[in-house]
Amino acid sequence: MIHSLIDSAVFIESFCNNLVMSHEVMPVKRHITQTIKLSLPLIISQITVVAMTFVDTVMAGRLGSVTLAAVAVGSSLWSAAILFVFGILMAIPAVVADMDGAKEHHKITPFFRQALWLALILGLVFTAVILFMDPLFKLFNTQPEVIPKAEAYLHALAWGVIPLSFFVAMRYLADGLSVTKTTMYVSFLGLMLNIPLNYILMFGKLGFPAMGAQGCGYATATVITIQMLTYMVITHKHKIIGSFDVFGQFDRPDWAEIWRFFKLGFPVGVSMFAEVGFFAVITLLASSLTTETVAAHQIALNFSSLLFMVPLGLSMGITIRVGNAVGRGHPVDIKNAGFIGVGMVLFTQIISATITVLFAQQIVSLYTNDEAVGLIAVGLLFYAAVFQLSDGIQVAAAGALRGIKDMNFIMFSNICSFWLLGFVASWYLCFKQGLGAPGLWMGIIVGLTAAAILNTWRFKYKT
């Protein structure tokens, strides 16, 4: 993958030269190679994380469309809630990269210790949120046979919220220091553990009862806890991360510092919640149609999410590189790091959209043998291919905006794009125009396209 992207530098350079007007401090090809070197471990890490959801979806599909629908609805609500935590803590890599670029290393350790206090608070709050989501199923008229399994799945997952908060904080510290391979290894460990744990708990092996969707939730919570403990050891022992000795002493909570950090990360949390919450609500709307429809929706969304990890990983790399350029005080490198990253993401999205269209039948066959579900899913994958272009651009531009700490605009953009435009379009096309699930996905395309335009314009304006 590295060589194919580098060989495509001419294509990306022509795209970037139309966007970058200032004299380049660093050659375009070097920008590309540096971004790939930094982002590739992040991409693999993100693919591995979503591969766990892929495994959950495939194994749930073997237990029938009702279990698959339960995991689909439950995981959509889990993602919406927990990514609010991810978003708030996502300020960590931007701040740490800035401090690292400015050679202010003495500030990193006290900052991160306060970030751990915030991670604990967020973990406690969102454990309660996950446990009390049950009324949402009735609010969105979820099919009655799906609700008990979805509730059991969420209640099992709740055990993983606090460990996940700490894991994410430590992972973002490493990312901010440009140490990205550790997350890749820990994520791969999680995937390797998830498969046998799912098999044992979902299907009832080694003396355990067959718990279906609930077993899937317990397996995920167990994997997250193991990953957190592993990352604690890495944070303490790693040559670079360990040099900051973040566990060397106990710092009492500095509420002023925690509040300052929360205010910095809050817009990112809201923006991520607005985006993922939008997809969660679309899934809940689909759950009011038929069990087959929500199962097909989950297949198309899950595969799209797997492909989305490439632009998301690149986006994280863009954040770090832009943030580092900010710390070094190089305005031209700030602009170039952002827009060259957008060009790279556009290139990868063209490839993924082509794969989705050409191999739709084969993709669906990996998830289910149900003919009715498969027919609907193949149709939805066409819309998934279309939105991958705008989805990649919007997340890449958002990564650049995080690098310059323009968090408030990302929040504004996501709320307007996904809720004022995307949600309204999805609801109208699905229910008022009678288009069903395709109408929901047309609305998703509207929301993502609006976000891509707004985020790209904003970064161009700010730089």
Image (tube, rainbow, N blue to C red):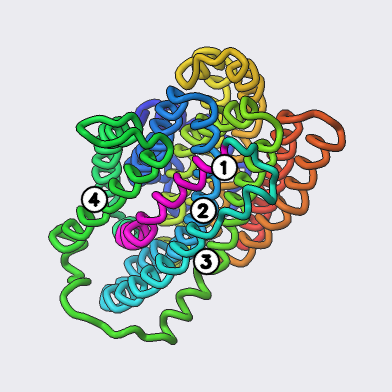
Residue kind at label 3, given as amino acid type: Lys
User: Does the magenta-highlighted stretch encompass residue 161?
Assistant: yes
Residue type, mark 2 in image = Gly
Quarter of the image with the C terminus is bottom right
Q: Quarter-wise, where is residue 243 in the image?
A: bottom left
For the record, the magenta segment spans 146-170
How far apart in space, not on screen, are marks 3 and 4 (Cα)? 32 Å
**Mark 3 and mark 2: Cα distance apart in space:** 10 Å
Please name the predominant secondary structure of the magenta segment in the image: helix
- Between 431 and 135, the one nearer to me in the picture: 135
* Residue 41 x, y percent position in the rendering: 32, 42
Name the mark nearer the viewer: 3 or 4: 4
SS for dot 1: helix
User: How far apart in space, not on screen, are marks 2 and 1 (Cα)?
Assistant: 36 Å
Q: Which residue is mark 4?
A: 226
The amino acid at mark 4 is: Ile
Disc marking residue 147: 1
Q: Nearer the viewer, mark 4 or mark 2?
A: 4
Residue 386 visible in the shown view: yes
Question: Of marks 2 and 1, which one's residue comes earlier in the chain?
Answer: 1
Which residue is identified by label 3?
A: 405
Q: Is residue 297 magenta?
A: no
Q: Residues within 10 Å of mark 2 (few under 14, many from 20)?
A: many
Specify the quadrant of the image occupied by residue 111: bottom left
